[in-house]
C-alpha cells in the first residue's frame, strides 16, 4: 500500500524537518494508521499520465476530516486523536455519496482528504455546485483554492464578485489571493480546475483561464512557516450541494518541477555559464571542472570560484546537486580575496542537512542560511543526489532564498546584530561584488546558472 510522504519522508529527511512539519507529519501518519483498511484508488496508468483520485464507485482512497489545524491534532494524545479521526470518518460517510460516477456532498459534514500525500504535481478536477454554496480545494492539507457563488451579493465584501479559483486564505493584497479573471460558469454547468503546484508556487486555471499565476501559497495553519513540503488534497464542502468528477493527479518528477520553476520569466535572465568551460569565471579555477554541462568542485579541493563581473542587486537562478555530506556555498557580493562567509555580503550555505555529521550545527549553518547570521527553514531539499532548483534575490540589504519553489529565507542583513560565535561579518554591508561558489572539498555540482540584474 503506497502512502508516499507518510512513510518516505522520515527516511528522506531524518534531520531536516522544522517543528511544524514534524507535527503535521505525525497527523498525516495518524490519519493513515486510523484508516489502513481503506485502500487507495487503483493507480492504473491512464493514457494522459494522470492517476485517478476517485474510482467513481466509492470513497476508497479518502478519509474524513473537517477544517481543523493539523498542528492541534498532532498535539492530542494518540487515543484522543484516533477517536477524533474515527468520528470525522463516520460524519463524512453520512454526507458523501457516489451517484453516476460523481462524488457528491450535501453541503454538510466533514471534508474528504486523500490518504496519499503529494509534493509537486498537476491536479485536475471538475465541480458543479448550487447558488449560495461555498467550497474549496485544500492543497497540501492547507486552505484553499476558493469555490463560491460569485453572484451572492452578501459575500461581495469578501471578494465573491471576483469569482472562484483564487488562493483565498493568502494574506490581504498577497499575489494569488484574488483571481486574475472571473471565469466561473453559470450554475448547472461543470467547471474545470487545473492546479500546477511546485513547492509553494501555485498556478490555477479555472475553465481554461489562468486565475492564479505562480503565486506563493501561504501556510494558513502557521503563517510564520512555509507551506508544508507535502500534503493531501482535501475537498471542502459547506453551504450547499457540490458534485465532483474526473478527479486526477499527475505527480511531477524532480526535474519536471525544476524545469517548471526555471521556465517562469526565463527570458528575463542572462546565462552566466556557457556549459562547456569556465570562461567568465575567476579564482580557484583549477579546483573546479566542467562535466556534463555542470560546474563541479573537485573532490578534496575547494576555494572560491567567482564571476568576473560584479553585481549589486540581482536575482540568481541555479540548480545544484549534493553528494552525501556535501558542503559548498554561494558567495554573494564577494570580493576577489577573502572568506565569503565574512568578507562578502554573505555566504549562503549549500549543504546536505540530512547527514549525521551535521546533526549538531548551529541553525545558521544549514542549507540556505546566511552563514552565521540568519537561519533558513529546513526540510525542503530534495533527496541527496537529486538536482535542486534555487533562486536567490539580493535587493539592497535584503536576501531571499527560494528552494524548490518554497521561500526558506528572507532576511534584512542590515538588521542583524547577533552572530554565531560572536564572529562579526564585516562584509555584510557591501553594496556590490562577485557571485560564485565557496568550495569546501566536496564534489558539489552546479548548472543552469543565470542572473537577472535589478
Image (tube, rainbow, N blue to C red):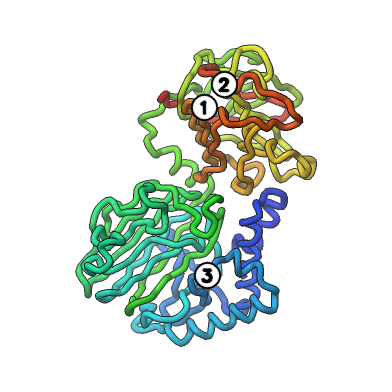
Query: Could you tell me which secondary element the residue under label 3 belongs to?
Result: loop
User: Is residue 298 visible from the viewing direction of this image?
Assistant: no
- How many other residues sit within 10 Å of disc 1, few (<14), some (14-19) or many (≥20)? some
**In which quadrant of the rendered image does the N terminus lie?**
bottom right
For discs 3 and 2, the disc positioned in front in the rendered view: 2
Looking at this view, is 152 or 163 the one in front? 152
C-alpha span from label 3 to label 2:
44 Å
In the rendered structure, find residue 68 and report the number of the disc placed on it: 3
The quadrant holding residue 194 is bottom left
Residue drawn at x 46%, y 26% as measured from the top left: 314
Q: Earlier in the sequence, mark 1 or mark 2?
A: 1
Question: Measured along the vertical axis of the image, is residue 347 above or below residue 175?
Answer: above
C-alpha span from label 1 to label 2:
7 Å
Asked whether the residues under the numbered discs 3 and 2 touch, taking CB atoms below 8 Å apart as contact, a structural biologist would say no
Query: Could you tell me which secondary element the residue under label 2 belongs to?
Result: loop
User: Is residue 40 visible from the viewing direction of this image?
Assistant: yes
Asked whether the residues under the numbered discs 1 and 2 touch, taking CB atoms below 8 Å apart as contact, a structural biologist would say yes
The quadrant holding residue 106 is bottom left
C-alpha span from label 3 to label 1:
38 Å
- Return the x and y of residue 380 as percentages of the image width and height: 59, 47
- How many other residues sit within 10 Å of disc 2, few (<14), some (14-19) or many (≥20)? some
Residue drawn at x 54%, y 28% as measured from the top left: 293
Residue drawn at x 66%, y 52% as measured from the top left: 17
Q: Earlier in the sequence, mark 3 or mark 1?
A: 3
Which residue is denoted by mark 1 in the rendering? 397
Residue located farthest toward the bottom when viewing the structure as drawn:
94
The quadrant holding residue 434 is top right
In the drawing, does residue 420 fall left or right of residue 70? right
Which residue is denoted by mark 2 in the rendering? 429
- Return the x and y of residue 96 as percentages of the image width and height: 42, 82
Q: How many marks?
A: 3
Amino acid at each position: 500500500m503506497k502512502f508516499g510522504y507518510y512513510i518516505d519522508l522520515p527516511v528522506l529527511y531524518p534531520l531536516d524537518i522544522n517543528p511544524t512539519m514534524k507535527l503535521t507529519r505525525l497527523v498525516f501518519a495518524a490519519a493513515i494508521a486510523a484508516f489502513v483498511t481503506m485502500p487507495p484508488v487503483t493507480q492504473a496508468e491512464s493514457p494522459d499520465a494522470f492517476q485517478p483520485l476517485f474510482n467513481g464507485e466509492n470513497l476508497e482512497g479518502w478519509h474524513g476530516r473537517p477544517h481543523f489545524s493539523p498542528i492541534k491534532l498532532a498535539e492530542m494524545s494518540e487515543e484522543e486523536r484516533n477517536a477524533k479521526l474515527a468520528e470525522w470518518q463516520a460524519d463524512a460517510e453520512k454526507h458523501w455519496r457516489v451517484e453516476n460516477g460523481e462524488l457528491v456532498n450535501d453541503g454538510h459534514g466533514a471534508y474528504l482528504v486523500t490518504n496519499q500525500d503529494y509534493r509537486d504535481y498537476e491536479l485536475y478536477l471538475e465541480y458543479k455546485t448550487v447558488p449560495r454554496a461555498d467550497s474549496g480545494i485544500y492543497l497540501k492539507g492547507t486552505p484553499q483554492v476558493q469555490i463560491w457563488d460569485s453572484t451572492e451579493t452578501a459575500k461581495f465584501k469578501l471578494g465573491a464578485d471576483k469569482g472562484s479559483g483564487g488562493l483565498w486564505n493568502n494574506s490581504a493584497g498577497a499575489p494569488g489571493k484574488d483571481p486574475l479573471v472571473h471565469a466561473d460558469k453559470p450554475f448547472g454547468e461543470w467547471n474545470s480546475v487545473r492546479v500546477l503546484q511546485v513547492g509553494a508556487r501555485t498556478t490555477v486555471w479555472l475553465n481554461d483561464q489562468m486565475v492564479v499565476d505562480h503565486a506563493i501559497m501561504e501556510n494558513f495553519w502557521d503563517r510564520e512557516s512555509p507551506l508544508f513540503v507535502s500534503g493531501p488534497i482535501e475537498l471542502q464542502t459547506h453551504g450547499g450541494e457540490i458534485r465532483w468528477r474526473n478527479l486526477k493527479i499527475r505527480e511531477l518528477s524532480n526535474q519536471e518541477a525544476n524545469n517548471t520553476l526555471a521556465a517562469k520569466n526565463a527570458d528575463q535572465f542572462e546565462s552566466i555559464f556557457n556549459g562547456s568551460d569556465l570562461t567568465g569565471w575567476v579564482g580557484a579555477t583549477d579546483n573546479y571542472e566542467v562535466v556534463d554541462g555542470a560546474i563541479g568542485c573537485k573532490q578534496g579541493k575547494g576555494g572560491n570560484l567567482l564571476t568576473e563581473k560584479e553585481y549589486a542587486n540581482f536575482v540568481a537562478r541555479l540548480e545544484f546537486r549534493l553528494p552525501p555530506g556535501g558542503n559548498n556555498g554561494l558567495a554573494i557580493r564577494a570580493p576577489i580575496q577573502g572568506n565569503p562567509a565574512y568578507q562578502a555580503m554573505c555566504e549562503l550555505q549549500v549543504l546536505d542537512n540530512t547527514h549525521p555529521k551535521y546533526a549538531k550545527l548551529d541553525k545558521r549553518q544549514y542549507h540556505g542560511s546566511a552563514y552565521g547570521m540568519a537561519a533558513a527553514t529546513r526540510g525542503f531539499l530534495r533527496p541527496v543526489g537529486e538536482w535542486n532548483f534555487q533562486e536567490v534575490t539580493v535587493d539592497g540589504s535584503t536576501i531571499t532564498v527560494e528552494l524548490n519553489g518554497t521561500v526558506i529565507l528572507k532576511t534584512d542583513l542590515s538588521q542583524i546584530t547577533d552572530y554565531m560565535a560572536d564572529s562579526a561579518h564585516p562584509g555584510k554591508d557591501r553594496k556590490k561584488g562577485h557571485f560564485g561558489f565557496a568550495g569546501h572539498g566536496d564534489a558539489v555540482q552546479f548548472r543552469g546558472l543565470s542572473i537577472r540584474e535589478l
